[in-house]
Image (cartoon, rainbow, N blue to C red):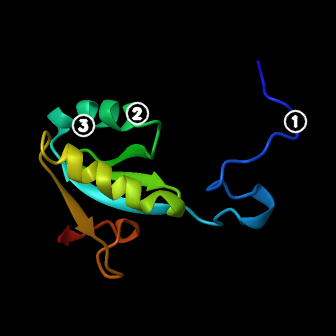
Amino acid sequence: MRGPVNAPRRPNQIPLEETAPPQWSRRLYIRISPADTAQFKFLLESYGHLAYLSVVDRYAAVARLVFSPNQENEVREFLSAVGLKITFTVLKLTQKNSPENGEFPCAL
């Protein structure tokens, strides 16, 4: 059952008309063992689909996380928590070694 249409908002809730949605998604690239990819994706989905994971290069073991800029803190908290269970490295992109050039970034 839904509440009344004119129900008062929670104090910390921002009305939709006051916030503009982000125009672009953020991306993080990670190097993760192919054996751990399924478990990582499962844990990511269990966090309420915080981001989505796609494998960029299965041979280089590089995957991309795509998420809303508004949730970057939550994504980084997730990575910290999952890093205790699964070994992976967050990669830093530079203009020279971007996936578009067929190369992948070095580890942070």
Could you say where residue 96 lies in the image, as x and y percent from the top left? 31, 82
Secondary structure category for the residue under label 2? helix
Identify whether 16 is placed above or below 20.
Answer: above
Name the N-terminal-most of marks 1 and 3.
Answer: 1
Question: Identity of the amino acid at label 1?
Answer: Val
**Mark whose residue sits in front, 2 or 1:** 1
Q: Residue at the location (12% across, 45% down)?
A: 84
Question: Identity of the amino acid at label 2?
Answer: Glu
Looking at the image, residue 44 sits to the left or right of residue 92; the answer is: right
Which residue, given by chain and number where applicable, does mark 2 sit on?
A: 45
Could you say where residue 15 lies in the image, as x and y percent from the top left? 75, 57
**Mark whose residue sits in front, 3 or 2:** 2
The alpha-carbon separation of the residues under discs 2 and 1 comes to 31 Å
Q: Residue at the location (59% across, 65% down)?
A: 24
Could you say where residue 85 lies in the image, as x and y percent from the top left? 13, 39
Instruction: Give the number of callouts.
Output: 3
Name the N-terminal-most of marks 2 and 1.
Answer: 1
Instruction: Let me know if residue 15 appears in the view.
Output: yes
Secondary structure category for the residue under label 3? helix
The circle drawn on residue 5 is 1
Which residue, given by chain and number where applicable, does mark 3 sit on?
A: 37
Q: Residue at the location (16% across, 48% down)?
A: 83
| Residue 75 occupies quadrant | bottom left
Q: Quadrant of the C terminus?
A: bottom left
Instruction: Let me know if residue 104 appears in the view.
Output: no
Could you say where residue 33 lies in the image, as x and y percent from the top left? 15, 42
Name the N-terminal-most of marks 3 and 2.
Answer: 3
The alpha-carbon separation of the residues under discs 1 and 3 comes to 43 Å
